[in-house]
Amino acid sequence: MGYCISQTDSSFFIPKELFGPALQSIRSIMKKDPSDGTGESCFFSWVNTEVVLEAKTLTDALKAWRWEPTLDEHGDIIDLSFMGEKSGADYFMFDAIAPYVGSQSYISMAGEDHYRWRWFFDEGVLFEQKGVITYV
């Protein structure tokens, strides 16, 4: 079960000097949730919490969330590629790192039913925008 998704386009940037705070932000959403009785948030059941909490690098944490970063010669993240198959709670991870993502960055996605959306970052805030295909 699940909703299959694929990445259609992206333009994404995080400077290497912000990797530490971005990693801490990802870790902060992985904290245990005592209210559900399992000690772990059900939203992230497909993410290996231990891998994220013990990740030494932002790259390792992103990979645990199924996102493969591309680094440039300076060590900055200049793109992300979705390595998963099904939808998860990626919005929450992107919302956590939004303050560290370059403005005007985006990741465009398509669902198995052809629904389109993108996560758009502007001045430290994440927006989820619906996509429309127009033929002229």
Image: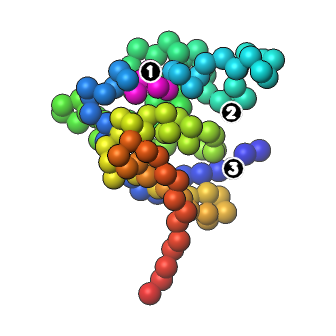
Residue in the foreground of this view, choosing between 91 and 45: 91
Disc 2 to disc 1, how far (Cα)?
19 Å
Query: Local crowd at mark 2 within 10 Å, few (<14), some, or many (≥20)?
Result: few
Q: Position of residue 95 (x, y in %)?
A: 50, 39
Residues at circles 2 and 3 in contact by the CB criterion of under 8 Å: no
Q: Which residue is mark 2?
A: 43
Residue placed furthest toward the left: 73
Please give the residue where the numbered disc 1 appears in the rendered image: 24
Which residue corresponds to mark 3? 3
Q: Residue at x 37, y 50 (%)?
A: 122
Circle 1: element type: helix
Relative depth, front residue between 74 and 92: 92
Residue 82 at x, y = what percent? 49, 43
Answer whether residue 24 is magenta in the image: yes
Q: Earlier in the sequence, mark 1 or mark 3?
A: 3
For the point 79% across and 23% down, the residue is 36
Q: Secondary structure at mark 3?
A: loop
> Which region shows up in magenta?
22-26
Give the mark nearer the N terminus: 2 vs 1: 1
